[in-house]
Amino acid sequence: MSKILVVEDEAAIRRVLVKILSEESDTYSVEEAEDGLKGLEILKKDDFDLVLCDIKMPKMDGVEVLEAVKKLKPEIPFIMISGHGDLDTAVNTMRLGAFDYISKPPDLNRLLTTVRNALDRKELVVENKILKKKVSKNYEMVGESDAINSIKEIIEKVAPTDARVLITGGNGTGKELVAHWVHEKSQRSSAPFIEVNCAAIPSELIESELFGHVKGAFTSAVKDRAGKFEAANKGTIFLDEIGDMSLSAQAKVLRALQENKISRVGTDKDIKVDVRVLAATNKNLKKEIEEGRFREDLYHRLAVILIKVPALNDRRDDIPILIEHFSKKIASEQGNTTKTFSNKAIDLLKGYDWTGNIRELRNVVERLIILGGAEVSEDDVKLFASK
């Protein structure tokens, strides 16, 4: 049930609003406050899905109520109620975070439509917050080794800035995870995070994928299409496996970094973009530069901050923590109880050569949970996780 608070000092209008909303849907629970001060007191004590608030009221006007509540509970949508002389103020309240405004006397259809839209928006905001928490858990950085703690410290320092970051490390070490953490701890965290796997896109399509194209630019270009850089505007783009990018695409990426402009394939028209670039590779880019496969000027543009993600073999002390983390995660995904690993099983796993790094360990833990006993034993490891 949606809880709605009507804050209005004119009793007649307040009664009309409460009556309309109460009769509109049995899913609306409507409360009322006779002035701004009373409304703020109620909002501090209880949660609401929507507030209808008059602008001109004694003791505390609607603008003051809006500003106070947005600091405490920014997710609550406000619909401002304005008299004829308050229209300019009503429009300005939208800059302060109001969802919309309605004029006195309220038009029934407009009122109900605006209320429904505001409640839908509130539901989306809540869903997005829940989804964001789930995403954060999926990209949790697990480990207490010196190497991982050092990376966490770097991220804390660099994330709030717009500095470009180059993340290096072997396959399966967690480079993507580091990129997600940089974005989520940045001031761009509410904006898009766009991932591009440069190794997975054919070289002849990489420029179109990154920068978009116009209709007729090539045979299959049947309509204009925006690229990943435009999609990431105001947010972050993560260029994974950038060492596999073609030289022609590298030249365009360099221009985007230098000028904050891109142009779609098939046109010279400039499009301004405001994008933070994170990149990752498992290749030695300095060697790639020597062999003419990677631009040195692009390397220096990308490598403002370098983060090297260690191999799992170099952080073996984190293996017990990772095993416990994966056990809980897999149990949650499969709806099972968490299995424990014996000390001898853990010691045996710590001694393995993890060429596939974190990704390989996760797969082995899942295999042992499925095939092993109630407590995963040393024998289970020998039988099901043999290298």
Image (cartoon, grey):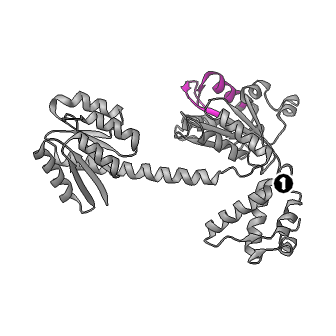
Q: How many marks?
A: 1
Q: Amino acid at mark 1?
A: Arg
Please state the extent of the stretch shown in magenta in the rendering: 250-277
Say which quarter of the image contains residue 338: bottom right
- Residue 29 spot, x, y in % from top left: 26, 58
Residue 301 visible, this orientation: yes
Residue plotted at (62% across, 66% down): 333
Residue plotted at (88% across, 31% down): 291
Rendered-image quadrant of the C terminus? bottom right
- Residue 35 spot, x, y in % from top left: 20, 41
Task: Report whether 364 appears left or right of 38.
Answer: right
Task: Report whether 6 appears left or right of 195.
Answer: left
- The image shows residue 271, relative to residue 333, as above or below, that is above
Residue tagged 1:
316
Q: Is residue 314 magenta?
A: no
- The image shows residue 303, relative to residue 374, as above or below, that is above
- Residue 85 spot, x, y in % from top left: 16, 28
Residue plotted at (29% across, 51% down): 116
- Front residue of this view, candidates 149 and 201: 149
